[in-house]
Image: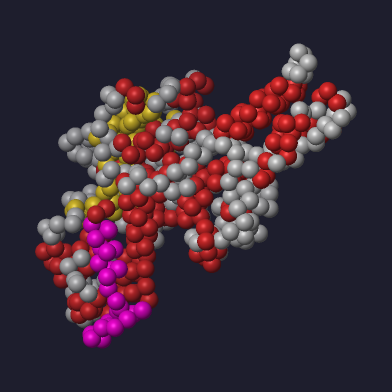
């Protein structure tokens, strides 16, 4: 997430929190929504910002925007939020113009506007709600861009010419006649203007009508070769826009009830995109009775539809209540791009099957977040599988050698082998122990005391000494912890430092089912 800038109308120094008058970090289940006020294409964008509470169930129906923030321009556009002029990126401003209605206001959740980005504590608490925000939205709108293929940044100015009416592509056949007409007109064009979004999605609609690759190749025999190449290049660039590589979109797309993809003046349902992907997966381009007018490089563009199938696979698992552990999610998606590298972990927490004891905390630096995630995974999985692979490629500063750097692109062979990691058992079932500084001090205290009265009772010590041979259940661990507490109170006097240390270690043992190693026994 990025910081936003705002100006006026107040000149008081206190205005730095406006239009965010409430600190949501102190309000449980509170979140904001914007009301995007109706207007014409060239009208100034005006929004109203209000706070709602999820536990009251009185918040209005809303849509959530999934988009790429993009780069700042030298002269960034401004929008009005509760009367305050806020500077935003070009991509967000264009997205709001495409979504704005002429006759009705609409309720939206947009991260850059609904979270006070300058309040680190609020930002951390709101990120923890992201899964709920996107899963309870009646619709998640994916905005790919305005069809210009420009870098989300900075040079292209918004056209003052309103786009045409938005065309919706779904799994029905209603738009098939329009798709054929669009491509028939386009194939006789001079290619002086860029391929439009309507032409790209018309091509995808026609793909769903063909039973095999031969039908597609036969269809394109009527097209000039230059047109075929140009169309495939436009499709390639559509599937390579920045949205597809962004880490946050994984959760935003997976938990959504309903998804609509917007690209310029075209809207497509998620089911439509999945149907296109299924059609392509059934085809075999290796053997066909028609000579191909499509180059191999063009056909490789179809491989990019795996981006849709990967997300859809996780959507199906989510709906079937089949969750994925954090390590698998990090290996699969962790290399995606994020403006803040800490989000490579935080963006995936809402999808985890394991109760990872991590909460988004933007007061921690990148190395601390990655280390915290790795230790939590080891504790949860009771496995060192996170250390598998080559961790020598690091760009993050201060990372221990055994901690993966999720900001680097993993080796593909490592990724493939990691998928079958469960088939290996080199450790023979030995369970790893994470030794915290407190636990290390505790063991040292038990081993180094010179006072025989301070040694652990022999029975409890034997239990701990043989811990590596046992498979403890929670009551057994509780019994050991009780013995440890008695050890501190054996002579009707409390050794406060030891008692506090053992009490805290005991709680950790019960919560995590961690086993302690050998402890010295008093033989006197």
508 in relation to 318, above or below? above
Which residue is at the far right? 450
* Residue sitting nearer the eye, 119 or 5: 119
From what the image shows, is residue 293 above or below residue 375?
A: below
Question: Is residue 434 visible in this depiction of the protein?
Answer: no
Report the quarter where the C terminus lies. top right
Q: Residue at x 33, y 74 (%)?
A: 299
- At 52% from the left and 29% from the top, the residue drawn is 121
**Residue 190 in the image, given as x and y percentages of width and height:** 24, 73
Quarter where residue 457 is shown: top right
Q: Where residue 239 sits: x, y (%)?
A: 36, 61
Task: Give residue 421's position: percent from left, percent from top.
Answer: 53, 59
The residue depicted at 53 percent of the width and 37 percent of the height is 358
Tell me, yes or no, if residue 385 can be seen here. Answer: yes
> Which region shows up in magenta?
272-296
Side (left or right) of 121 relative to 246: right
Task: Decide whether residue 280 is among the magenta residues.
Answer: yes
Q: Can residue 82 be found in the magenta stretch? A: no
Give the residue drawn at x 43%, y 22%.
27
Depth check: 417 or 189 in front?
A: 417
């Amino acid at each position: 997430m990025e910081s936003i800038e705002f100006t006026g109308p107040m000149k008081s120094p206190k205005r730095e929190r406006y239009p965010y008058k409430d600190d949501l970090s102190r309000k449980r289940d509170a979140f904001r929504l914007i009301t995007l006020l109706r207007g014409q294409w060239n009208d100034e964008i005006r929004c109203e910002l209000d706070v709602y509470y999820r536990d009251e169930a009185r918040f209005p129906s809303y849509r959530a925007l999934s988009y790429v923030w993009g780069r700042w321009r030298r002269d960034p556009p401004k929008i009005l939020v509760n009367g305050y002029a806020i500077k935003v990126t070009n991509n967000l401003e264009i997205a709001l113009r495409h979504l704005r209605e002429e006759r009705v206001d609409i309720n939206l959740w947009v991260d850059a506007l609904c979270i006070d980005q300058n309040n680190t504590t609020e930002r951390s608490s709101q990120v923890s709600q992201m899964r709920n925000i996107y899963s309870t939205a009646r619709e998640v709108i994916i905005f790919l861009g305005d069809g210009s293929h420009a870098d989300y940044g900075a040079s292209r100015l918004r056209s003052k010419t309103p786009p045409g009416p938005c065309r919706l592509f779904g799994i029905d056949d209603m738009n098939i006649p329009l798709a054929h007409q669009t491509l028939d007109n386009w194939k006789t064009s001079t290619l002086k203007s860029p391929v439009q979004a309507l032409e790209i999605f018309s091509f995808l609609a026609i793909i769903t009508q063909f039973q095999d690759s031969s039908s597609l190749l036969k269809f394109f025999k009527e097209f000039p070769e230059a047109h075929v190449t140009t169309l495939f290049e436009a499709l390639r660039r559509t599937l390579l826009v920045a949205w597809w590589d962004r880490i946050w979109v994984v959760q935003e797309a997976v938990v959504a009830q309903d998804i609509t993809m917007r690209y310029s003046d075209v809207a497509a349902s998620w089911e439509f995109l999945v149907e296109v992907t299924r059609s392509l997966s059934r085809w075999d381009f290796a053997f066909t009775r028609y000579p191909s007018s499509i180059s191999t490089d063009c056909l490789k563009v179809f491989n990019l539809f795996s981006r849709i199938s990967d997300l859809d696979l996780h959507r199906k698992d989510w709906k079937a209540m089949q969750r994925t552990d954090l390590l698998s999610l990090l290996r699969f998606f962790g290399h995606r791009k994020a403006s803040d590298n800490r989000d490579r972990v935080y963006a995936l927490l809402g999808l985890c099957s394991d109760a990872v004891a991590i909460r988004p905390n933007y007061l921690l630096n990148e190395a601390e977040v990655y280390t915290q995630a790795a230790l939590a995974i080891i504790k949860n999985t009771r496995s060192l599988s996170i250390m598998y692979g080559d961790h020598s490629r690091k760009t993050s500063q201060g990372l221990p050698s055994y901690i993966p750097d999720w900001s680097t692109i993993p080796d593909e062979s490592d990724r493939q082998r990691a998928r079958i990691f469960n088939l290996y058992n080199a450790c023979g079932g030995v369970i790893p122990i994470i030794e915290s500084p407190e636990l290390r001090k505790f063991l040292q205290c038990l081993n180094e005391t010179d006072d025989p009265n301070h040694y652990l009772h022999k029975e409890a010590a034997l239990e701990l000494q043989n811990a590596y041979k046992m498979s403890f259940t929670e009551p057994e661990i509780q019994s050991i912890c009780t013995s440890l507490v008695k050890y501190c109170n054996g002579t009707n006097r409390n050794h406060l430092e030891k008692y506090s240390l053992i009490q805290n270690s005991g709680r950790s043992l019960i919560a995590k089912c961690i086993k302690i190693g050998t402890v010295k026994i008093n033989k006197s």
